[in-house]
Image: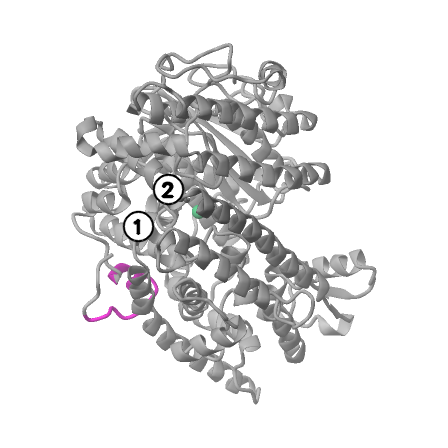
């Protein structure tokens, strides 16, 4: 069962009333009501997938009218299965409790796969209405499981027996993850506290929604309109989209700069209108902090108060202490120590960057002091002057199809995977643009799974790029193979034309493929061992980015789209030389937010005034006046729209420490990034084990020691601290 919130507890496998799975004899059959039984038999979104090894989703038979009854019946069936497990008169055993839980909920899992496609790839207003209605029901269903006292009593009974159970290492790890997750979510509380816990969660869900809506209102409400005389410096493509945005808002002939990052960032980078830059900057960084009906300060204070109260019920001193229990950094102090170690070097670098910019401004005769709204504008000028890197020239050598081949090449060299396109129509897809490849073992020919690629933007598809699974690997109930997918938002080229992408997009393409390779390499026995650890989960994907600039990839796949010529060496050198550019800005704006996040969640928030605290803490920290937090408190959706990254925003940096350290091991290996021995070690120790081994231990197995921050500091062009700690 894949739970969206309780990500580490998961199982797949089937259990419809009419088709009991092989190993369920020790669990009494679940009792379903008539409506549920009917849906389980007739609803296409709950139906078993056709094909061997678990089959593939029937994406060609998706019917939006069927999703609500599918979710309702799927939840009811899963809860009935959970009750059968919890109330089993037989003594708790690993098989009749943990394995049975892994096996339960498969019909809902299938329905959630389609739900995910509608949510991310094919959204419509009609779907969003259904989603809004179903979200609280899904959340209530999840609490019913974690708060099931009889179920937790069985889990605890097993957990308390420790080594006496004689479990395999994978089983022991799964039991620990399940136990921790239940325990961290209030399974042990008495009835009164459980009720309070649930009430807090409900209030938090409402406040977090309010936070997002306020933010959205300020993003939609504050638009800066330009006249044709005010578009100086802006790229033609940006001007065209700003014109269209103004027309959409009933202002034909004007240009709209909306209050979002994708509009603000290029405007501040290119606009020659300094006063307008200041206005756009102020609008953006004041979101949620305008003292009006959309102000988020009071909302934040209340959210922090409730989170604090909830973890106090569980006996934790602060929210951060609770949140980090199942992270790689298990204590807030470890995360803070890392952030502090990088902070001073990054601030020093900002000083150099500002000096460079001030010099450019002076040379131009601009009598100004660099202000926050000047940073991106002058940084761009410094970039051109120092590195002479032309992104349009780069693009001519970066064709999407060739980069995909390059990824397959890397997957073949490193993981021993072969990717073969399947014939159109042989595996169902949800849109004709989606293509599917079969993944096999290059040597044995063994089937590993299918890889789905949905490359192009379309209305109703969420922005950005992401990776996901439709099914993870497991073997405990018969082999189930991986269905992994990568999704991007490239503009579809005219038929027969190559799709040229930017260097950043090429990096992202590799990044997301790294997530996919992590899915495909899994060897774990139980589905619940495929879950991610918040501050570790970006490591594998970030690491794969490092293969993009390897000679093997560059020589063979970076080819001019017209002439087929390889990319000139000077251009490659320029890319490499520019790698540490603007790292002061990027690191400081990130760390400002990450440190503030940890601060908010490490204090008793009683009577807190977020606006005052933010100001006071940043001053104490010595935040350079030219840079705001990447996400100021009142706009910090990562930590206040949900609990996804609350006390966890540092995780990006934590994973990057591992990335740099592991990449350096390859750079120094005899065979470089294609070193056979090290490559095998990487796959075995760090990819294939998923969450079956504690990540810190897995990393030590790979590297022979803990990661240190030295490589990260080198990658960012920062000096190495004299006595750097290890992670
Ligand atoms: Zn990622």
x%, y% of residue 439?
41, 26
Q: Secondary structure at mark 2?
A: loop
Mark 1–mark 2 distance (CA, rounded to whole Å): 24 Å
Q: Which residue is mark 1?
A: 328
x%, y% of residue 558?
44, 46
Q: Nearer the viewer, residue 518 or 358?
A: 518
x%, y% of residue 197?
48, 48
Q: Residue at x 26, y 61 (%)?
A: 709
Labels 1 and 2 touching (C-beta < 8 A) = no
Is residue 496 left or right of 597 when viewed as pictured?
right
Q: Can residue 714 be found in the magenta stretch?
A: yes
Q: Can residue 402 be found in the magenta stretch?
A: no
The N terminus, quarter of image? top left
Question: Is 438 situated above or below 401?
Answer: above
Q: For the residue with label 1, is its CB less than 8 Å from the closest atom of ligand 1?
A: no
Q: Secondary structure at mark 1?
A: loop
Q: Which mark is residue 188?
A: 2
x%, y% of residue 441?
33, 24
Question: Is 40 situated above or below 311?
Answer: above
Q: Residue at x 64, y 64 (%)?
A: 235
Query: Which label's residue is closer to the chain start, 1 or 2?
Result: 2
The residue mark sitting in front, 1 or 2, is: 2
Question: Is 65 situated above or below 377?
Answer: above
> Magenta part of the protein: which range?
710-722
């Amino acid at each position: 069962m894949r739970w969206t919130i309780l990500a580490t507890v998961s199982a797949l496998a089937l259990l419809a009333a009419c088709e009991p799975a092989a190993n369920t004899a020790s669990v009494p059959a679940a009792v379903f009501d008539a409506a549920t039984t009917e849906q389980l038999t007739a609803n296409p979104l709950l139906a078993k997938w056709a094909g061997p090894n678990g089959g593939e989703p029937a994406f060609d038979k998706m019917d939006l009218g069927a999703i609500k009854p599918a979710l309702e019946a799927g939840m009811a069936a899963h809860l009935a299965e959970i009750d059968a497990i919890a109330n089993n008169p037989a003594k708790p055993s690993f098989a009749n409790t943990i394995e049975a839980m892994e096996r339960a909920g498969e019909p809902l899992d299938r329905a959630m796969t389609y739900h995910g496609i509608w949510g991310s790839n094919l959204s419509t207003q009609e779907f969003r209405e259904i989603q809004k209605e179903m979200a609280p029901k899904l959340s209530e269903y999840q609490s019913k499981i974690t708060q099931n006292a009889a179920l937790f009593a069985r889990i605890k009974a097993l957990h308390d027996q420790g080594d006496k159970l004689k479990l395999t290492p994978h089983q022991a790890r799964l039991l620990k993850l399940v136990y921790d997750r239940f325990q961290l979510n209030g399974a042990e509380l008495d009835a009164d506290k459980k009720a309070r816990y649930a009430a807090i969660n409900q209030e938090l869900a409402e406040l977090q929604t309010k936070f997002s809506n306020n933010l959205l209102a300020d993003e939609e409400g504050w638009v800066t309109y330009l006249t044709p005389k005010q578009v100086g410096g802006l790229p033609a493509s940006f001007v065209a989209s700003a014109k269209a945005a103004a027309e959409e808002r009933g202002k034909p002939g004007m240009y709209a700069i909306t209050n979002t990052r994708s509009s603000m960032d290029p405007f501040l980078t290119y606009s020659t209108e300094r006063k307008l830059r200041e206005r756009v900057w102020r609008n953006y960084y004041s979101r949620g902090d305008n003292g009006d009906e959309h102000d988020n300060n009071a909302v934040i204070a209340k959210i922090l108060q409730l989170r604090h109260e909830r973890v106090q019920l569980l006996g934790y001193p602060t929210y951060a202490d609770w949140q980090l229990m199942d992270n790689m950094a298990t204590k807030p102090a470890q995360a803070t120590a890392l952030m502090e170690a990088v902070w001073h070097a990054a601030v020093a670098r900002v000083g150099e960057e500002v000096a460079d910019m001030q010099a450019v401004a002076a040379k131009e005769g601009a009598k100004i002091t660099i202000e926050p709204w000047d940073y991106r504008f002058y940084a761009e000028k410094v970039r051109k002057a120092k590195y002479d890197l032309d992104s349009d020239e780069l693009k001519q050598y970066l064709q999407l199809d060739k980069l995909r081949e390059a990824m397959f090449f890397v997957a073949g060299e490193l993981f021993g995977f072969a990717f073969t396109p399947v014939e159109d129509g042989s595996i169902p897809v949800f849109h004709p643009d989606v293509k599917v490849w079969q993944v096999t073992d290059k040597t044995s020919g063994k089937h590993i799974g299918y890889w789905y690629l949905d490359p192009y933007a379309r209305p109703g598809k969420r922005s950005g790029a992401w990776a996901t699974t439709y099914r993870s690997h497991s073997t405990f109930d018969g082999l189930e193979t991986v269905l992994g997918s990568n999704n991007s938002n490239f503009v579809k080229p005219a038929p027969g034309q190559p799709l040229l992408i930017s260097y950043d997009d090429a990096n992202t393409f590799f990044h997301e493929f790294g997530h996919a390779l992590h899915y495909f390499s899994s060897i774990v026995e139980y589905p619940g061992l495929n879950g991610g650890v918040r501050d570790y989960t970006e490591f594998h994907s970030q690491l794969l980015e490092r293969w993009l600039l390897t000679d093997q990839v560059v020589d063979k796949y970076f080819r001019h789209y017209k002439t087929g010529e390889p990319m000139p060496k000077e251009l490659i050198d320029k890319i490499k030389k520019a790698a540490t550019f603007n790292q002061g800005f990027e690191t400081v704006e990130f760390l400002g937010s990450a440190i503030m996040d940890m601060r908010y969640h490490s204090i008793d928030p009683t009577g807190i005034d977020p606006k005052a605290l933010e100001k006071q803490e940043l001053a104490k920290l010595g935040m350079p006046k030219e840079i705001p937090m990447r996400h100021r408190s009142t706009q910090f959706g990562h930590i206040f729209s949900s609990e996804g990254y609350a006390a966890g925003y540092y995780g990006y940096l934590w994973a990057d420490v591992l990335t740099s350290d592991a990449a350096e091991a390859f750079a120094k290996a005899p065979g470089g990034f294609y070193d056979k021995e090290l490559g095998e070690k990487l796959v075995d120790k760090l990819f294939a084990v998923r969450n079956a081994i504690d990540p810190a231990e897995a990393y030590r197995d790979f590297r022979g020691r803990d990661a240190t921050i030295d490589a990260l500091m080198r990658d960012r062009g920062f000096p190495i601290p004299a006595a750097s700690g290890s992670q």
